[in-house]
Amino acid sequence: MSTKGEKELIRAYGDRRDDGVVQLAFTLPVPMSEKAKEAALLYCQKMGFHDIKIAATERAADNYSFFIVYAHTKAVLDYAEIDTPELVVKKLGFDDLNKVIEEQVGRRIVVFGACTGTDTHTVGIDAILNMKGYSGDYGLERYPWFEAFNLGSQVPNVELLRRARERNADAVLVSQVVTQRDVHKDNSKQFIEEAKKMGLHGKVSLLLGGPRVDHKLATSLGFDAGFGPGTKPSDVANFVVHQVLQRMGKEEKGLHYEGEPTAKAAKGAKT
Ligand code: B12
């Protein structure tokens, strides 16, 4: 821990502390050969690494070669300088959370979710919403005090929002898995634009999730929260309940989770 104003310099750890050793994995669009290995080494040099060791090579496909490389970097980072929003959900167990909804909300919480745009990857949103859940954790359909609708894959943003509005949903869950050419960001921006047009932005909790999503990205795009790899349905259930209680004025904002983008983080956020 650093005290205010104190630098906290860190470097990558390989064999011993501060040696700056990193492991890289990448593919070059050339057939596997000694020349390809030399190209991988030179490529690492061009990236600024030194003491480079090609640890493993493999033919990836016709005319493609895959490399795992150990290399040293001189880069040093001041950890104390980093200021990024982080979602920390204070969690209640399944029974306790249902009880809170019953006693404090007094009705079932309605959530709609889908994998929107051109994305077909439903496993992530299924993990959160479906009865069987994920990693030993019940999905939202299993909670008696949640009413969860999973619209599936390739759902147009406007369709998801329209269905959510029809049922006065409390939260809308968007899953984005494919990130090629930043399609997840473009689609998510379009979702937020539609939500604004339909008057839902700021009124309904909008959640973005996927393997390359984090809270910082999601909030910078206009969502209320972002959930990445390893998210459990109970993380989402707890977050949504606290958002509903906050909207009802029964909880202070910030009481149950930290991570609103700070001025500094929001300024530096890249979308
Ligand atoms: C299964 C799979 C498929 C299946 C999907 C079947 C289905 N019904 O979902 C099929 C075969 C259809 C498929 C197709 C394609 N796929 Co695919 N697929 C995968 C694979 C192997 C697993 C994905 C998965 O199920 N993960 C498990 C779930 C549980 O994890 P998750 O999605 O991260 O979800 C968790 C969190 O992220 C979070 N979460 C996710 N969403 C949400 C939403 C909310 C609101 C919240 C709160 C949380 C949350 O909670 C979940 C639980 O913790 C991955 C590779 C991999 N190993 O990850 C590639 C992968 C995702 N696919 C990939 C690609 C490229 C494709 C195709 C484009 C291939 C092609 N050229 O046709 C097509 C896409 C077509 C399309 N239009 O979308 C790439 C994506 C690369 C990239 N950078 O974008 C990957 C990474 C493979 C690779 N290395 O190249 N694919």
Image (spheres, rainbow, N blue to C red):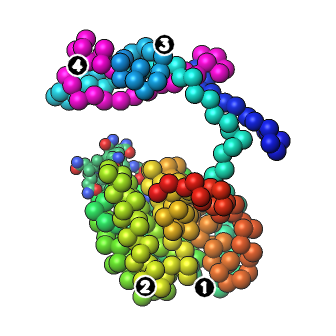
Outermost residue to the left: 62
Q: Is residue 200 magenta?
A: no
Cα–Cα span, label 2 and label 1 = 24 Å
Q: Amino acid at mark 2?
A: Met
Query: Upstream in the sequence, badge 2 or badge 1?
Result: 1
Q: Residue 186: horizontal and vertical position, in percent?
A: 36, 62
Please give the residue where the numbered disc 1 appears in the rendered image.
107
In the image, the segment drawn in magenta is: 15-40
Where does label 3 land, which residue? 51
Question: In the image, what residue occupies the spot 80% across and 38% down?
Answer: 6
Q: Which residue is mark 4?
A: 32
Query: Residue 177 placed where, x, y %?
Result: 38, 54
Mark 4 Cβ inside 8 Å of ligand 1: no
Instruction: Using the rendered view, name the quadrant where residue 98 is placed.
Output: bottom right
For label 4, the SS is: loop
Circle 4 packing at 10 Å, graded few (<14), some (14-19), many (20+), is many
Q: What amino acid type is highlighted by mark number 1?
A: Arg
Up-down: is 256 above or below 37?
Answer: below
Q: Tag 3: residue type? A: Asp
Labels 2 and 3: the sequence-earlier one: 3
Mark yes or no: residue 177 visible. Answer: yes
Q: How would you rate the neighbour count of disc 2 (Cα within 10 Å): few for under 14, some for 14-19, many for 20 or more? A: few
User: What residue do we see at 26% from left, 18% from top?
Assistant: 36
Residue of label 2? 198
Q: Tell me whether the residue at label 1 lies in contact with that at label 4, contact meaning CB atoms closer than 8 angstroms.
A: no
Closer to us: mark 2 or mark 1?
2
Where in the figure is residue 196, as x and y percent of width and height? Answer: 46, 80
Front residue of 221 and 67: 221
The N terminus - image quarter:
top right
Circle 1 residues within 10 Å: few <14, some 14–19, many ≥20: few
Q: CA distance from mark 4 to mark 2?
A: 53 Å
